[in-house]
Amino acid sequence: MDRDAPADFTPRFAGTGRLKDKVCFISGSSSGIGRAVARLYAREGAKVVITYHSDSAEGDEVAAELQREEAAEVLALQLDATEEKSCHDAIARTVEHFGRLDVLVCNAGIQQSEPDFAKVESDWIEKIFRTNVFGYMWLAQAALPHLREGSAMVFTTSVNAYRGHKYLIDYSATKGAELGFLRALAASLADKGIRGNGVAPGPIWTPLIGETMPEEDVESFGSDVPMKRPGQPNEVAPAYLFLACDDSSYMTGQVLHPNGGIPVNG
């Protein structure tokens, strides 16, 4: 596979207003799956908050795309998922700007391929857990006072939470932690009418793959699944739409699996 091949973020169908006027916060939405989710939410009528880590130009580019292509109301915010204050500030700015919050998508994450787990340094282990797990928890804590009956949370976990990955041991551990967190949180919020669900993508072609995996693994990326190819971000985004809108009103604590046919349980 071409390491420089572009990922496809463009929704494939016309919107039907399933998120009309909903305020949707999506962490990690300046690229990858999050960018495709933001674009689809905008097409479905949402007011979208996108976040970027450090590249404001990237955030501005995605915001401009949503405004130009989907006529969406967009707020672009810097977010450092490793910092509690940054997470709380981002949610506070969202509510200050739009006056409400209806959907929280926790998606920001990092990974780094390492065949020898003994070489994974403690500083990196702390960083990946702060980003992939603590960031989800802090965003949820900040969002909960603003959510109400009918609100939804959607967490990105991974097929690696279920089957692991021999070169992504630390990453797989964080994805397992996210899975446990979303299920427990969903159970605690069910009687309030706030739903929490997850998406566990399989091999999806995003910029992160070419940036973090060895070239030989990129060339064969996705070839080991039954569909024999990686998925595109716009093939995953509809799972996030389903879980954010009322179509999934009788689901909480569940996970969807757009993974090219990999059998998983749960």
Image (tube, rainbow, N blue to C red):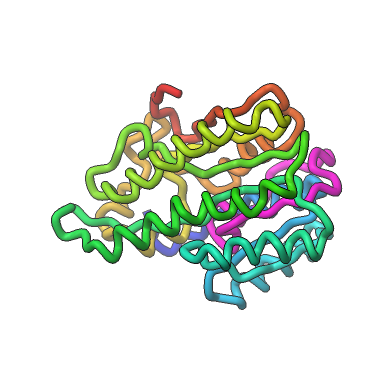
**In the image, residue 236 above or below residue 208:** above
* Residue nearest the observer in this picture, 71 or 163: 163
Q: What is the chief secondary structure element of the magenta stretch?
A: loop
Residue 57 placement, left or right of 116: right
Judge from the rendering whether residue 192 lies leftward or rightward of residue 258; answer left or right. Answer: right
Q: Name the residue at 76% across, 51% down.
A: 101
Total numbered labels placed on residues in the image: 0
Residue 245 sits above or below residue 123 on the image = above
Q: x and y percent of residue 250 in the render?
A: 69, 22
Q: Which residues are magenta?
A: 10-35
Q: Residue at x 16, y 60 (%)?
A: 119
Question: Which residue: 50% across, 32% down?
Answer: 257
Queried whether the magenta region covers residue 38, the answer comes back as: no
* Snapshot quadrant of residue 238: top right
> Residue 245 at x, y = what percent?
74, 36
How far across and how far down the image is residue 72, in percent? 81, 59
Q: Quadrant of residue 78?
A: bottom right
Q: Is residue 95 above or below residue 183?
A: below
Q: Nearer the viewer, residue 63 or 100?
A: 100
| Drawn side of residue 20 relative to residue 211, left or right | right
Give the quadrant of the C terminus.
top left
Is residue 27 highlighted in magenta? yes
